[in-house]
Image (tube, grey):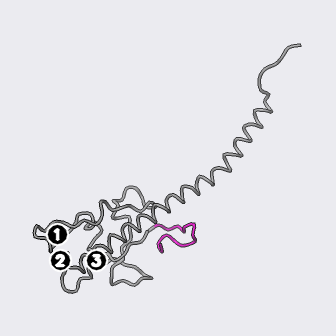
Amino acid sequence: MTLRRGVTLIELVVTLALLGLMAAMALPLAELTLQRSREAQLREALREIRVALDRYRSAADQGQIERRVGDSGYPSDLNLLVEGVPNVRSPKRERLYFLRRVPRDPFAPAELPAAATWGLRSYASAPDSPSAGSDVFDIYSRAEGVGLNGLPYREW
């Protein structure tokens, strides 16, 4: 009587079928994890830029930023938050910076510069139909999808 070592074809097929089934079950979970991660990045980027916009407006209200009559007190573009503006109350006119870099929309195409990934809303535009103008009052994502919370990314 000889001992046979090895795997039969049926055992191999059953093993491969089980591995395929487990991989098929794990794929939706991986996609959900990726979406959650991107949504967390989007939430953080929106918060970071909106806080910088509010800080810019606060500095303008305190007279640290030169403001013309009729200006809203918000920056003319997002890059101004990174480049900085002169502090008119400082004798050396040191620059005030509000962001280290403009965060990018995680749902936007990678070839766009970070500031161009956002939709801009001016102070004069209506909340339900945001449009760009002479200043940046708020930002929104241009992504077409709907978040896990049921809200379109544009409305975050």
Q: Could you say where residue 81 lies in the image, as x and y percent from the top left?
A: 27, 67
Residue positioned most to the right: 1
Nearer to me, 123 or 93: 93
Q: Is residue 15 magenta?
A: no
Of mark 2 and mark 1, the one earlier in the sequence is 2
Mark 1 neighbour density, 10 Å: few (under 14) some (14–19) many (20 or more): some
CB atoms of marks 1 and 3 within 8 Å: no
Foreground mark, 1 or 3, reads: 3
Q: Neighbour class for label 3 at 10 Å: few (<14), some, many (≥20)?
A: some
In the image, taking residue 151 as reference, residue 136 lies left or right, namely: left
Residue at position x 79%, y 32% from top?
A: 11
Q: How many marks?
A: 3
Q: Which label was assigned to residue 20? A: none
Residue 66's tag is 2
Question: Circle 2 sits in a helix, a strand or a loop, which is it?
Answer: loop
Instruction: Look at mark 3 in the image and give the residue it sits on.
Output: 58
Answer yes or no: do the residues labelled 2 and 1 have beta carbons within 8 Å?
yes
Q: Amino acid at mark 2?
A: Glu
Q: Residue furthest bottom?
A: 70
Question: Dot 1: what SS?
Answer: strand
Residue 18, by quadrant, is: top right
Residue holding disc 1: 86
Rendered position, 1 above or below 120: above
From the viewer's perspective, tell me whether residue 82 is left or right of residue 95: right
Q: Which residues are magenta?
A: 143-156
Residue at x-position 44% and y-position 60%: 106
Q: Nearer the viewer, mark 2 or mark 3?
A: 3
Tell me the kind of residue under disc 1. Pro
Q: CA distance from mark 1 to mark 3?
A: 15 Å
**Which amino acid type is shown beneath numbered disc 3?**
Ser
Between the residue at mark 2 and the residue at mark 3, the CA separation in whole angstroms equals 12 Å
Identity of the residue drawn at 33% across and 64% down:
115
